[in-house]
Image: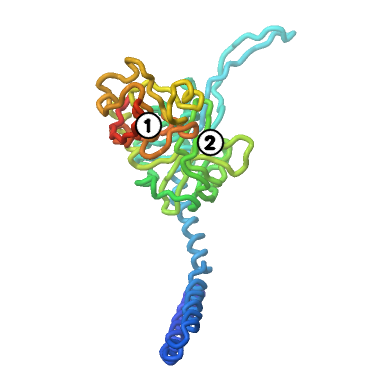
Amino acid sequence: MKQSILIALIILCSLISGWIWAYGMLYFLWDDISENENILTEVQKWISEVKEKQDLPKESELEWLQENITNIAKTISPSVVSIVIKKDLVIYRSDPFGFFQQPVGSVERKVWGGTGFFIRPDGTLITNKHVVEDTDSVYTVITSDNTEYDAKVLALDPINDIAIMKIESETVFTPLKIVENTDTTKLWQFVLAVWNALSEFQNSVSLGIISGQNRTIETIDGKLGWLLQTDAAINPGNSWGPLVNLNGEVIGINTAIADRSEGIWFSIALNKEKVDYMLESISSDGRIKRPFIWIAYVPVSPWVQSELWLSVDYGAYIIDEPGSIVEWSSADLAGIEPGDTILEIDWQKIDTRNDFNTVIQNRIPGQEVTLKILKKWWEEKEIQLELWEY
């Protein structure tokens, strides 16, 4: 500690001395410098170079970064849990010749495991839907102190790969802080992934950066959008732990690994508003509701453009038939008509990379969005529309 303070004082004194010397030279030589603008330019350039050198990363700053990462990992690890998935497996008895097998009973066995993290002190936690969607399985949560709890699934997100679970216990748990605003997550910022590697190595931590934003990938259940891409190592069995920034805030839940790749992992972006809405939806309706615009549409492609004589080759074309817009729905009330084409949602272009449902699914019912519409007579128009829920 004393050595770090000494280094800081030396750097500070060097900087002050450099400035005093530079301005002293300017004071005594001002008349000469005024006659020669090139000398003044060179002195200013030298001062700028000195400032740039002083702003380079110092050993003390790297030590702070190391200490901060260590503290964050220690703080969030107790809130990250292991999820053990058990299932009754049928036991068969074979005849002496091995021709026939007869079921004689069943035994409960661990079939897989995963990771989750607390989002409420009452034992409510979040994980991925693909981890706990089997209704025939039994789920056990193991906390960082190796205490086991029975857990139940409260709800599965119908669109995103998210599930909400709850421990039945009087114990008060420490929830992780969720970032308030997703927009504060920046490209190339440092992040930590905390997980239960291969369902065995509890509370492992990896460090990386945000490699990309607003990614879309194909999964077995369809497209997942609005994803964060990271190079913080994620492996089978840990793809549902938290992704955390250097403020110790959860910015996403790790969800997928790119096939046949190394260093390409994805997290579903989270913020406090989104998590709070899911919990309120479960509390009031027993399920997670999602936003919806009540229209029937086809994605616009070059072929659709040619067939329908459209002026654009992207967007969501609302079928020009009666009933393609539900009467008295938010789309109907906003003035959208059959034959219109939705080009953008909140200035995000609707195309093969960001299809209509992918862009909508990461909003919250009740939010107001701005739609850029191409009317059937080829006039562009912007309208405001409130997302309803289903």
- Quadrant where the C terminus sits is top left
Instruction: Assign a secondary structure to mark 2.
Output: strand
Residue 256, label in figure: 2
Q: Position of residue 153 (x, y in %)?
A: 41, 28
The 10 Å Cα crowd at callout 1, few under 14, some 14 to 19, many 20 or more, is: few
Residue under label 1, please give it.
168
- Residue 351 in percent (x, y) is at 46, 32
Number of labels in the image equals 2
Q: How far separated are the C-alphas under marks 2 and 1?
A: 29 Å
Marks 2,1: beta carbons within 8 A: no
Q: Earlier in the sequence, mark 2 or mark 1?
A: 1
Q: Is residue 313 left or right of residue 371?
A: right
Q: Is residue 242 above or below residue 305?
A: below
Q: Is residue 297 above or below residue 1?
A: above
Where in the figure is residue 285, as x and y percent of width and height? Answer: 30, 25
Residue sitting at 53 percent across and 33 percent down? 113
Q: Amino acid at mark 2?
A: Ala
